[in-house]
Image (spheres, rainbow, N blue to C red):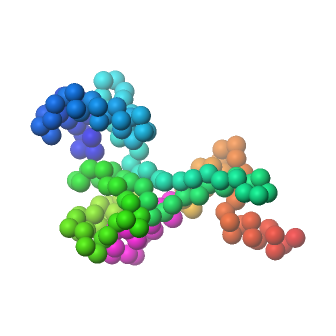
Amino acid sequence: MARGITTAAEIASSLGISRTAIYRHLNNLKRNGLIMYRDGRFYVAARLFLVYDVDIDERGSIRMIIFPNKGGFVDETIGFAFVKGEYCRCDVCIARERCLTAVKNLAKKLDVKIRSENPLDGFREVVEEITRRDLVKILREGFLIVKLPEEIGEEVSEE
C-alpha cells in the first residue's frame, strides 16, 4: 500500500497470495486501525503510528504516556516498519541499514533532525520531537488544555 497498490486484487497478485487470505489480513489491519477502506481501495491509515497509554493518577489527572521506542511507520521502499522497543536488536539485525535509511527518510519528511546512526534511537528522536512539536500543538489548539511535565513543574515552583 505504501507503494500505491491499493486493491485486494492488486495486493494478492503482487504477493502471490489468494484474495481470500489477503482479505483476512486486510480486515484484521482495518479492525486494528492500521489501514482504512474507501472507494473500493485500501489505504494506510497514517504514516506514523504511536504506542501510548492513558492513565489517571492519584490526583485524578489524566496522563497520556507515549512510548517513543515503540510504534511503526510506513516507508515507500520497505513498507511498514514495526518498532518493538527493547525487543529490537539493531546491533544484530540484517535489515539495520535499510531500517536506518527508512528512519532517516521519515525524519526528513517530518522535518526532524536526528543524530543517531542506530535505527531505534533515531525513531525515538523522531517520536520525541513530533510529540513535543506537533502533538502538543494539535491538542492545545483544540478544546484541551495541555501541559508538558516540565511546564507543570514550573507552575509549582512559581507558586
Q: Is residue 50 left or right of residue 72?
A: right
The structure residue drawn at horizontal position 28% and vertical position 75%, both measured from the top left corner, is 91
The vertical placement of 101 against 18, above or below, is below
Q: Start and end of the magenta stretch?
A: 113-130
- Residue 139 appears in view: yes
As drawn, 117 above or below 107: below
* Left or right relative to 64: residue 157: right
Could you tell me which quadrant the C terminus lies in?
bottom right
Location of residue 69 by image quarter: bottom left
Q: Could you tell me what secondary structure mostly forms the magenta stretch?
A: helix
Is 136 inside the magenta-drawn segment? no
Q: How many labels does the image show?
A: 0
Q: Is residue 112 visible?
A: no
Query: Picture quarter containing residue 5?
Result: top left
Q: In this view, does 143 lie above or below 112?
A: above
- Residue at 34% x, 31% y is 27
Which quadrant of the figure has residue 146?
bottom right
Q: Position of residue 55 (x, y in %)?
A: 65, 53
Residue positioned most to the right? 159
Q: Position of residue 46 (x, y in %)?
A: 41, 44
